[in-house]
Amino acid sequence: MTDTLQREALAARAAGEHGRAVELWRAVLAETPDEWRVALELKRDLKAGWHYPESDPQFRRAAASLPDEEWLAHYAALYAYHGEDLETLDQRARTVLERQPGHPAVLAILGDVASQRRDWSGAQAAFALAAEADPRAEYRLKRDTAAMYLRLAPCLSGAQPASVASYAIGFVNLDRNPEREAELRRQFAGSAPPLHRSAGVEGRRLPAAAVERLGGDTQMRGTLGCFLSHAGAWEAMLARGDRHCLIVEDDVIPLLDLPANLAGLALPEDFDIVFVNDRIAPRLDPAATTGFRTLTLVAAMHAFPPEDNAPGGDGYIVSREGARKLLDWVAEDGFGEDVDWRLIAYGLSPDEIAGLPRPSHAGPWLDRVGRLVGRAARLRAFVLHPPLIRTVGVSSDREDENRLHAAGAA
């Protein structure tokens, strides 16, 4: 029976019937729950059928039984490991290391786990051993980055209690993702500022007429929902009376425990917005970094990798005045395009956008988004180096909802 189901599943995949293939693979997996190859096959058709959130657990399920070499070969794709999964990943790596002492890739996995736990001392030690065994640039860079965060941690020491915090942390979270909220709260438990949840907007539930009226694209409803969610977080911070707020999405972790005040970050006075996420942060030499610094947004965008297509709206500090400006401007300009690119466009003049390096993703994207900006005024915008926030590898709700409607239209 199992062989027949597998043949039918492969035939369904070949015909492009991924939903049918998923049903068949689930039936096979019910009969052979410990067969990692079947879990990988199920994951493949889930991804092909735009069911990304379900594909990650299947990959982790398969990884629990993968042979050592297969596991190592797939490790780069195991980005979904986070939270409680890290203990499993750590234990597996140590078991493999006992069988293959000094294996640089396994040592690097231990360094990655330590980094995600903000154990920068452990990360530095693991990456240093990996670099000794295999002096590739990737391992040396990760070693130096761990050492950098280890040096910078004292800059944020002496945190005051949350009752006297000078800023808050506002996070966007969809009602259907309570597990992401729980994980985010766990990750930020060592940070001093108070955490405030802002309910996200599900773009897939918006009627087409509303999407068009708001300036969105009916085939990109997840993008609109994400934009509206950020606008809701700006409104919420003003309603609370926050002077400053770190706005984050629910798929991030802090790279350091955050202090109650912003003094240790050397931020400019009277800023409107400071991006603090790792996707927009410039790639500066970590070995030469001795403290936090801010760059103007235009300087950071000149250093933005030309192949990157997402500057990341997943972590930025906004002032009250900055939040007011953003709410006033989007009320006039609508909610078209991605929120992160709109934030960038609000911080760059047309001449600065025109002067960005070409060819790149950023230049043409900002050419288009910049046309939605209806005024000469711009945000006082900066980028922090090194970053405070990084995205973890979970499926993007925005992209999943976009795929859902794109598939429906097709």
Image (tube, grey):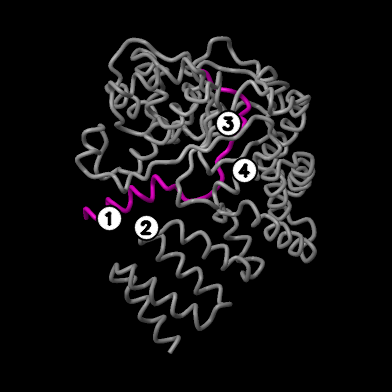
Q: Quadrant of the N terminus?
A: bottom left
Cβ atoms under marks 3 and 2 closer than 8 Å:
no
Depth check: give the residue in front, 69 or 295: 295
56 w.r.t. 240: above or below: below
Furthest toward the bottom, the residue is: 1
Label 2 element class: loop
Amino acid residing under circle 1: Ala
Q: Are marks 1 and 4 in contact (CB under 8 Å)?
A: no
Percent position of residue 137, x then y? 65, 39
- 197 falls in the magenta region: no
Query: Which residue is disc 1 drawn over?
Result: 407
Q: Position of residue 86 (x, y in %)?
A: 67, 54
Placement of the C terminus among the 4 image quadrants: bottom left
**Going by the image, does 89 lie left or right of 219?**
right
User: Label 3, on which residue?
Assistant: 169
Q: Which residues are magenta?
A: 382-410
Whether 398 is among the magenta residues is yes
Image quadrant where residue 256 sits: top right
Measured from the top left, where is residue 228 in percent x and y?
Answer: 37, 34
**Left or right: 366 as drawn, with respect to 91:** left
Which is more N-terminal, label 3 or label 4? Answer: 3
- Secondary element type, mark 1: helix
Q: Which residue is mark 4?
A: 185
